[in-house]
């Protein structure tokens, strides 16, 4: 019996609330709509409160109720995860009501909304860049605010997201085995983020990219690439002596030195062969020239014989 009574009371309350909500939505009574909207806000019925606050926007414009409607509407959107709308409303509040004691809170919440609305690193990061600007603007405007204490941490978090996206974009070239592009992209990444926390990983990718590029290089570029890879491996070993990359760099240096020696031997063999070929060509050219000279001399000799007139014939003289 007791459970039945409680159930009936609960149903009556739900019906009553629904009736008041419907009545407020149809009503033109500003005071009644505001009362029901605030009740829904207090009960954390964000979407219902927002539906009524939206009706009140024009009704309370220019009145003392306007600040509360805008402020509560912004919070309702924030709790309902409509961060972009909430951020705009909080910013609008801090600009429209500069004398209100809640102005600083609204400015902070506006910045926080942009932070909450920042997209995942693999998506467009325009919202992240905007959030960093908004958070920095709050610090500049309220440097002594208690709320500013965690702003730097939020900015660092968002900045790292931008760093990580840039790192991942550069790493795509490495995944595709485009080692030349990966090396350049990681170099550009570290130029853009000189204090990055991902420096060790970035240099690790550069290390392997330079190594692969050198070991599999075309002949004309191989010597320079072997030297560049060797120098970079020594740099990694020096900068990160206790990391796995240092161990990897040591092995690479050994392989690179062996490859240098093999390449120098191959280079000398090619140079020697080229010299032998040149000498052979020179000998052949000399023989050809000598043969050509002999032929010329013979032709001249034959020509002299042909052009010389025959001597007169002597006949016996009869007495």
Image: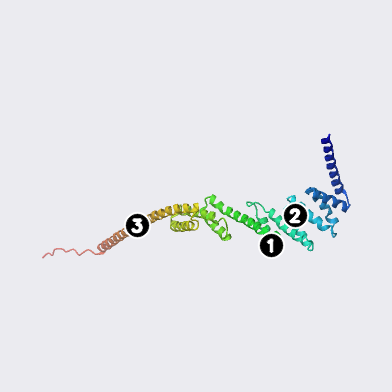
Distance CA(mark 2)–CA(mark 1): 20 Å
Q: Residue at 76% of width from left, 53% of height from top?
A: 75
The numbered disc on residue 139 is: 1
Check disc 1 and report its element: helix, strand or loop: helix
Q: Can I make out residue 103 in this image? A: yes
The reply to whether the C-beta atoms of the residues labelled 2 and 3 are less than 8 Å apart is no
Q: Earlier in the sequence, mark 2 or mark 1?
A: 2
Does 88 sit left or right of 174 as displayed?
A: right
Q: Which residue is mark 2?
A: 86
Q: Say left or right for 300 vs 158.
A: left
Q: Between label 2 and label 1, give the one nearer the viewer.
A: 1
Tell me if I can see residue 181 in this picture.
Answer: no
Q: Residue 87: image x %, image y %? A: 73, 56
> Image point 85% across, 51% down: which residue?
35
Say whether residue 251 is left or right of residue 53: left
Q: Position of residue 14 (x, y in %)?
A: 83, 42
Place of residue 44 in the rendered image (x, y in percent of width and height, measured from the top left): 78, 48
Q: Nearer the viewer, mark 3 or mark 1?
A: 1
Question: Which of the image's four quarters has the N terminus?
Answer: top right
The residue pinned by badge 3 equals 272
- Residue 59: x and y in percent read 86, 55
Q: CA distance from mark 2 to mark 3?
A: 78 Å
Q: Residues within 10 Å of mark 2 (few under 14, many from 20)?
A: many
- Badge count: 3
Q: Residue furthest top?
A: 1
SS for callout 3:
helix
- Tag of residue 205: none
Q: In which image quadrant can residue 58 be found?
A: bottom right
């Amino acid at each position: 019996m007791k459970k039945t009574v409680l159930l009936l009371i609960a149903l009556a309350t739900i019906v009553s609330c629904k009736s008041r909500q419907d009545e407020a939505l149809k009503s033109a009574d500003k005071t009644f709509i505001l009362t029901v909207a605030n009740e829904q806000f207090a009960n954390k019925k964000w979407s219902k409160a927002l539906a009524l606050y939206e009706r009140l926007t024009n009704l309370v414009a220019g009145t003392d109720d306007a600040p509360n409607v805008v402020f509560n509407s912004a919070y309702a959107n924030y709790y309902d995860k409509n961060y972009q709308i909430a951020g705009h409303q909080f910013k609008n509040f801090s600009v429209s009501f500069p004398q209100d004691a809640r102005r600083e809170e609204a400015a902070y919440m506006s910045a926080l909304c942009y932070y909450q609305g920042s997209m995942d690193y693999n998506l467009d990061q325009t919202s992240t860049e905007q959030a960093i600007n908004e958070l920095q603007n709050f610090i500049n405007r309220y440097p002594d605010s208690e709320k500013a204490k965690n702003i730097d941490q939020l900015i660092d978090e968002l900045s790292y997201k931008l760093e990580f996206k840039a790192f991942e974009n550069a790493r795509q070239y490495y995944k595709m085995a485009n080692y030349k592009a990966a090396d350049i992209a990681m170099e550009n990444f570290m130029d853009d983020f000189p204090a990055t926390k991902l420096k060790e990983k970035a240099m690790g990718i550069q290390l392997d990219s330079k190594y692969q590029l050198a070991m599999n290089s075309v002949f004309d570029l191989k010597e320079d690439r072997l030297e560049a890879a060797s120098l970079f491996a020594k740099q990694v070993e020096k900068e990160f002596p206790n990391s796995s990359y240092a161990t990897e760099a040591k092995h690479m240096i050994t392989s690179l030195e062996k490859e240098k020696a093999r390449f120098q031997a191959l280079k000398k063999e090619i140079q020697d062969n080229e010299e032998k070929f040149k000498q052979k060509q020179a000998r052949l050219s000399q023989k050809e020239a000598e043969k050509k000279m002999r032929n010329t001399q013979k032709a001249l000799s034959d020509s002299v014989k042909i052009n010389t007139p025959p001597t007169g014939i002597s006949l016996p003289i009869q007495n």
